[in-house]
Image: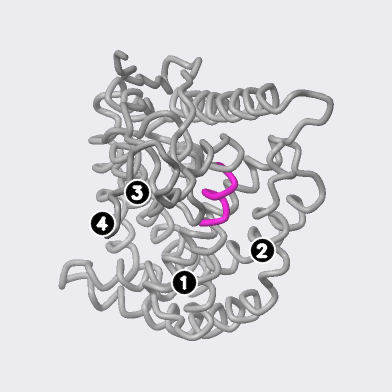
Amino acid sequence: MKRPHARGTGTRKAGRREPPPAQFSDLLSASLAAAVRDFQRRLKRCRRHRDAESIHQLRVQSRRLAVCCDLLDALGGGAPVSKARRRVKKLLRSLARLRDTQVQQDLFRSVPARLDSAAKILRRGLRREEPRWARRVTERCRRVRAADLDPLLLNTRHLGALSGRTESAAERGLETAIEKWLEQLDAEARRRLKLVRASRPESLHRFRIAVKHLRYGHEAVASVLPGKPDGTLRRLRSLQGKLGEIQDLEMGRARIEAAAAAHRRAGKKLNPLRLWLVRQRDGRIRRLLENRSRLRAALTVSYSTRKKATRSDFSSPLRRVPRTRLKNSTVSSRVNRRSS
């Protein structure tokens, strides 16, 4: 007759040992490794398909990876970071040319019917340019190798592991450096907002770039900070989308003026289309700048209480996020401490 197992006698098999709490550097390393994997997946798809959606997704992921390189550079990444950034930037420039060609074709398809005859002239030129930029993108995609990125972003030594200090001090120093980096992105976006003028579309373009860096910067570290951006990143995405629409209209206007200068005979035919684009652009700028306080509020990214990290969040078994507070008031974190 088998005797029942008594509690505390040690006869029952020991359960699985719980993994230790994740360090801040481990969380950040896993987040950056996920960004590399997403980039490689988009790159592999773009090598096979060069449709507009694949180009757009690769461009977005390339910008996110470029922001990750900026973060690693701020943490003392060194020469490997600079090499990876150069590769990504070259790919981004080729992607931008091809993406602009595709977007402007869609833009000139959406014009009123009375302007379609003028838009056909521009669409014809854009269709001739597209294969050339597509070949350039294919060439750049082949030059980017996984070996250029894996040692860079998967190695935690590039995350600022500081020698001569204790492990806890290194973790605090790493978190402080990331907070400072986010504060710099926030300050640059607010500085660009102050310089925006409705009569100067190029000032809106520079503001859009600063907003893009701020958004991708927060997305790169949102999974490791103590809290999650509760709806505030959606406002940044919406603002970036509105600024992108204005930039597309401005690029269309510049293309029309370039075509009119190259072919003076077609200048009169293209002028009504140019005026229509200018009215559309100015109307969007006016509506965007009506309430600057709302724009400043859109730049404020706050972090609310988040749940503990799970296995589905990262590739490694991570259990919790360190509880800290960000110093900047515009990047505040509020962590609810449970009473014991």
Whether residue 215 can be seen here: no
Residue 197 position, x and y percent, is: 42, 30
Residue 63 position, x and y percent, is: 53, 54
Whether residue 72 can be seen here: yes
Q: Residue at x 77, y 31 (%)?
A: 162
Colouring scheme applied when the structure was drawn:
one colour
Front of the two marks 1 and 2: 2
Q: Which residue is mark 1?
A: 264
- Which quadrant of the view contains residue 228? top left
Mark 3 to mark 4 CA distance (whole Å): 13 Å
Q: Amino acid at mark 2?
A: Lys
What secondary structure is found at the residue carrying circle 3? helix
Of the two numbered discs 1 and 3 on the same chain, state the one appearing first in sequence: 3
Of the two numbered discs 2 and 4 on the same chain, state the one appearing first in sequence: 2
Mark 2 to mark 4 CA distance (whole Å): 34 Å
What secondary structure is found at the residue carrying circle 1? helix
Q: Amino acid at mark 1?
A: Arg
Q: Nearer the viewer, residue 34 or 46?
A: 34
Q: Which residue is mark 2?
A: 90
Mark 1 to mark 4 CA distance (whole Å): 19 Å
CB of mark 2 within 8 Å of CB of mark 4? no
The residue segment tinted magenta is 28-34
Q: Nearer the viewer, residue 101 or 82?
A: 82
Of the two numbered discs 1 and 2 on the same chain, state the one appearing first in sequence: 2
The question of residue 48 being in magenta is answered with no
Q: Nearer the viewer, residue 163 or 334?
A: 163
Q: Which residue is mark 4?
A: 276
Question: Position of 208 compared to 39: left or right?
Answer: left
Q: Residue at x 15, y 72 (%)?
A: 113
